Amino acid sequence: MTKPMLLAEFVQLPPVYRTRLVDGLASAIDPVASRARASHQFLRYQWFAAALAAYGGAARTLVVEDEKGPVIAMPLLGVGPRALGAATVPGCYWPFRSFPKVAGLDATAFEALADALSRAANVVRLGPVYDGDPAATGLVKAAQRRGWTVIDRFIADSYLLDMAAEAQNGWPRNSTLRKNRFHEKHLAEHGALDWRFLDGAALAEGGFDMLAAVEEKSWIAARTDGRDAKFTATGHGAFWRTAAQDPVLAEMLHAALLTIDGAPAAFSFDLNVGALKYAIANSYDPAVGKHSPGKLLYYRNLIAAMADGITTVDWGAGDSGYKQVIGAAKGPAIRDWLLVRPGAAALAARALGGWWRRSGQG
C-alpha cells in the first residue's frame, strides 16, 4: 500500500511570471496598487491618467502576472525621438514618481520585468524616487543583473518628522503654543480667522481654487513664472483636479486652510496614506506674512494629524530650515535613475554618465 505524502513533503515550486505590454494605461494598475505597500497605494490608474491629461503623451503599461493575477504594473511614456527608444514612468513629482507593485514580491518578478522592458525600450528614466523605493530598487537590481548600465543622480535629501517620537517628547511645547496664540491674536487684527480642513471632495468642489488663490498672491507668483505652482491653471492645477476624480485618491487628499474675512490666506496640502502623511505643498499671503500664518496653520494641521493617527510626516525635499525647527530629520535621498539596455546605447550612456550626475540638484 502506497504511503500518502504529507503536505510538508511537497516541493514548493517557484512562481512563474508572465509579462504583457498593454497599449494605454492597464486596468491592472488599481488591483496592483491596492496590494502595494501602504506608502505607495496612491499610485493608481487615475494618478497616471491625471499626469497624461495634464502634461500630455500616450502611455503603454508593462504588466507582470503570476498565477493569481497582476503583481507589477509599470506605465511607460515615450520621450524624445522615436529612434532613441527612450521612455519614462509618467506621474507627478510630488511626492515621487514610481510604479505600483505587490508588497513582498521576490526578485524573479523584477527579472521578468527587466526582460520585458528590454523589448519595450532602450533607455528608461525612473524617478525622482526615494532610496529604498520598493519598485525602483527591485528593477534597478534586476537590470544590473541583466547587464544594463545604471546611472543615478542625486536630487535632494528628504526630511521626515517622527510624530510618534515627538509626541512622547511633549510636542508641541507649551512655549510654542504660547507664541502661536500671540501671533494668532495679532493676525486676527486683519479680520475674522477661519481654520478649516478639506477632504478630496471639498477640494474638488472649490477648495483647489482657494489654494490657487493663495498661490497667486504668494512669492511663487511674484518671483517666478508660476509654472511650479501646484494648483493654478498655469501650474499643476490640472493634475490635482483630475487625480481627485478617483474617489479612492480623493479620500487620501487633505488640506488645511486659513481664511481671513473669507479670503484664502494660507494652506497646507497633504496626501495621507495610512499612518503616513506626505506634505506636498504649503503657501501663504505675504500681506499677512509677518504674523506667520503658514506656521500657525501647519502646527494646527500637524496637531490634528496626530489626533487622527498619523505617526510620520514626509516633508520631501526643499527648504530644510523650518522643517528642522519643527523636528524633522534627514531621511532617504531622492534620486533619478537612468537604465540603459546593453549595447551601443549603454556605451554612450557611460560616456555621458558624469553629465547626468552633475545635472541633479545636489
Image: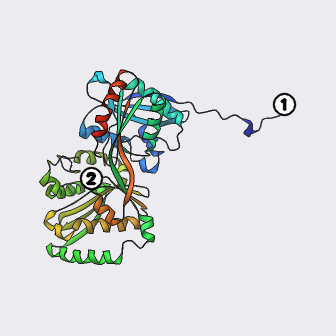
From what the image shows, is residue 188 above or below residue 346?
A: below
Quadrant of image for the N terminus: top right
What residue do we see at 34% from left, 51% from top?
157
Q: Earlier in the sequence, mark 2 or mark 1?
A: 1
Q: Pick whichever, 226 or 43, lies toward us.
A: 226
Q: Position of residue 200 (x, y in %)?
A: 31, 54
The amino acid marked with disc number 1 is Thr
Q: Nearer the viewer, mark 2 or mark 1?
A: 1
Q: Which mark is residue 309?
A: none
Q: Quadrant of residue 14?
A: top right
What percent of the width, then of the height, locates residue 113? 46, 31
259 sits to left or right of 314: left
Comparing 289 with 197, the one in front is 289
Q: Position of residue 77 (x, y in %)?
A: 32, 32
User: Mark 2: few, some, or many residues within 10 Å (few <14, many ≥20)?
Assistant: some
Residue at 36 percent of width and 75 percent of height: 173
The residue wearing badge 1 is 2
Residue 197 shown left or right of residue 27 in the figure: left
Could you tell me the amino acid type at mark 2?
Ala
Is residue 25 among what the camera can see?
Answer: no
The image's mark for residue 204 is 2
Q: Secondary structure at mark 1?
A: loop
Q: Where, by quadrant of the figure, is residue 169 drawn?
A: bottom left
Residue occupying image coordinates x 19% and y 71%:
291
Q: Residues within 10 Å of mark 1 (few under 14, many from 20)?
A: few
The reply to whether discs 2 and 1 touch (Cβ–Cβ < 8 Å) is: no
- Where's residue 197, x and y in %? 30, 63
